Image (cartoon, grey):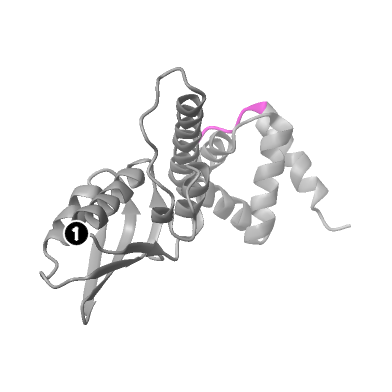
Amino acid sequence: MVIGGRMDADRALLTPRGELVRGCAQMLAAKLAELPAGTARVDLDMSGVHFMDTAGLGFLDVLRDHARRRSMPVTTSRWSGQPRRILELAGLDTTDPLRTPAPRSSPAGSAVALERQERLHLLQEEVEQLRQAIASRPVIDQARGVLMATYGCTSDEAWHILREASQLSNTKLRTLAESLTACAEAEGTPPPPEVRTALARALARRAPR
């Protein structure tokens, strides 16, 4: 992540860019420590943050602590995409999560503690699913290219064929894409029979009548 910034009179406008992950809270703390002594307000434009994991909650804690210690207003705005989804799962205000009080410690067996544990579990699942999707994207794009080159279909058609073949063969999309791209390589091995059958059915359904 890169945290840009500028001063507008006694107001600091910070513009984080990139992924809000482990280590970003420390980076933010260092940036805040560099602000001029006369700074009376800090506003963060979060529109440049396209990915956030649970470390983003620590990022918000740094801002809350700065606002409390310096007795100044601190806001975050323009959350979107996946980071906004993480805020929703955490039960925070997606317009400005700093408006939501930081959760206080509770007895381990209390309903509040159990709810917080469940929310954290959902957050971790959401982040892991997104990481897998990002990791899978290159091989899926390659498989779409193979279908487009082989059958003259469009990119959207290739995507639908892959998804349908995945469902028909009960095969994960990434696994199906890997077998398809592997067979396109020199001396590549053909996909398993169930994948070949599913691909043939998916292609037949989209063949011109």
Q: Is residue 138 left or right of residue 64?
A: right
Q: Is residue 26 left or right of residue 145?
A: left
Q: Quadrant of residue 71?
A: bottom left
Q: Residue furthest right?
A: 209
- Say which residue appears at 25% left-offset and 53% top-offset: 68
Query: Pointer 1: what residue?
Result: 70
In the displayed structure, 152 sits above or below 24; it is below
In the displayed structure, 162 sits above or below 50; it is above
Q: Position of residue 172 (x, y in %)?
A: 59, 33
Q: Position of residue 115 (x, y in %)?
A: 51, 29
- Say which residue appears at 43% left-offset and 42% top-offset: 131
Tag 1: Cα neighbours inside 10 Å, few (<14), some, or many (≥20)? few
Q: Start and end of the magenta stretch?
A: 188-193
Q: Position of residue 38 (x, y in %)?
A: 13, 73
- Say which residue appears at 29% left-offset and 52% top-offset: 64
Q: State whether residue 39 appears in this view.
A: yes
Q: Quadrant of the C terminus?
A: bottom right
In the displayed structure, 7 sits above or below 99; it is below
Q: Nearer the viewer, residue 154 or 38?
A: 38
Q: Residue furthest bottom?
A: 9
> What type is the residue that disc 1 sits on?
Arg
Q: State whether residue 46 appears in this view.
A: no
Q: Position of residue 81 (x, y in %)?
A: 50, 57
